[in-house]
Image: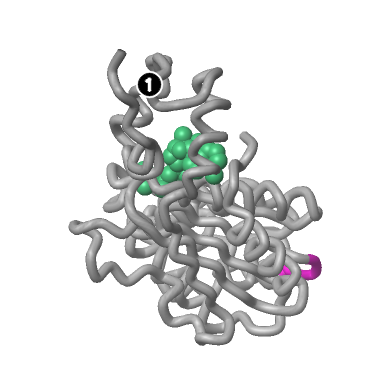
Amino acid sequence: MEVVGRAAELAVIDSFLDTVSGGFATLVFEGEPGIGKTTLWAEAVRRGTERGYTVLSCRPTSAEATVSYTGVGDLLTSVEDDVYGALPALQRRALDGVLLRGETDGRAPDRRTVSVAVLSVLRALATSPVLVAVDDAQWLDRPSAAVLAFASRRLDGEPLGVVTVVRLSADANGVRTFDRDVAEHRRRAVPVSPMSLGALHVLLTARLGRPGCNAKPSSDLRADVSSKSSIMCSHAPARPAR
Ligand SMILES: Nc1ncnc2c1ncn2[C@@H]1O[C@H](COP(=O)(O)OP(=O)(O)OP(=O)(O)O)[C@@H](O)[C@H]1O
Ligand SMILES: [Mg+2]
């Protein structure tokens, strides 16, 4: 999907991806529900993929926020078997436990072993640029968040970037996402604000086929707008009824 407007944020994405090739960096899009965070996050993933970066991504949901290691499991699904094969046996077994595969003793994997194993996997992949992409980090399950925080505190010169989204809302106030301990010079937080009037106009015209908020919206768009009212129509000029 084409991103409308957001020139400044897209420039930040490009500069972030440039930075990643020189060492560890994180980029966080934060803002209220429906403001357009995931759109920017997905564009970062698209641009990273286009540059040939190895992309590991996950999109946690509130429904799975209490299910241990869902996030890490999703992040690791695209990792090739030979990367696991090169890990020390203890670490490989821990990841087998997280990924629910291979021979395990049925016990929950030890958090420190999983953390070290995930860091090993990230370092093994980072012989060329890697992008770890986590949408809605406020819903990342706690063990996964702890594992990613552990890795984030240790990554340094590796060409690895983390791009995340944090949804700020009344009930998410004070949430400490895994990226919060990253050194200031390696972390950039970008507040996502409402789209400009011009960009909204372009977006509505593209979605509705003709300009203005008085056009008849499709049922898809109406559903979208009702659940994600922030970016749409909040600035749309009122039109007199005919
Ligand atoms: N810059 C943009 N260009 C085109 N479409 C956009 C843009 N920003 C947002 N949208 C559209 O607006 C809707 C909401 O955007 P998005 O899902 O990115 O918001 P969000 O902040 O991630 O929402 P939530 O907090 O619910 O996860 C989507 O249908 C998306 O396609
Ligand atoms: Mg979103």
Residue occupying the point 33% across, 63% down:
142
Residue occupying the point 34% across, 59% down:
138
Disc 1 secondary structure class: loop
Q: Relative to residue 34, is residue 210 depicted above or below?
A: above
Residue occupying the point 37% across, 36% down:
237
Residues in magenta, as a range: 124-128
Residue occupying the point 56% across, 71% down:
26
Q: Quadrant of residue 19?
A: bottom right
- Seen in the image, is 4 located left or right of residue 230? right
Whether ligand 1 has any atom under 8 Å from the Cβ at mark 1 is answered as no
Could you tell me which quadrant the C terminus lies in? top left
Q: Relative to residue 35, is residue 213 depicted above or below?
A: above
Q: Relative to residue 51, is residue 15 depicted above or below?
A: below
Could you tell me which quadrant the N terminus lies in? top right
x, y percent for residue 221: 41, 23
- Seen in the image, is 82 located left or right of residue 16? right
* Three-letter residue code for mark 1: Asn
x, y percent for residue 115: 49, 72
Main SS category, magenta section: loop
Q: Nearer the viewer, residue 24 or 80?
A: 24
Decide if residue 50 is in sight here: yes
Badge 1 density bin: few <14, some 14–19, many ≥20, Cα 10 Å: some
x, y percent for residue 220: 41, 20
Decide if residue 97 is in sight here: no
Q: Nearer the viewer, residue 1 or 145?
A: 1
x, y percent for residue 157: 71, 83
Q: Quadrant of residue 191?
A: bottom left
Please give the residue where the numbered disc 1 appears in the rendered image: 214
Q: Relative to residue 231, is residue 149 depicted above or below?
A: below
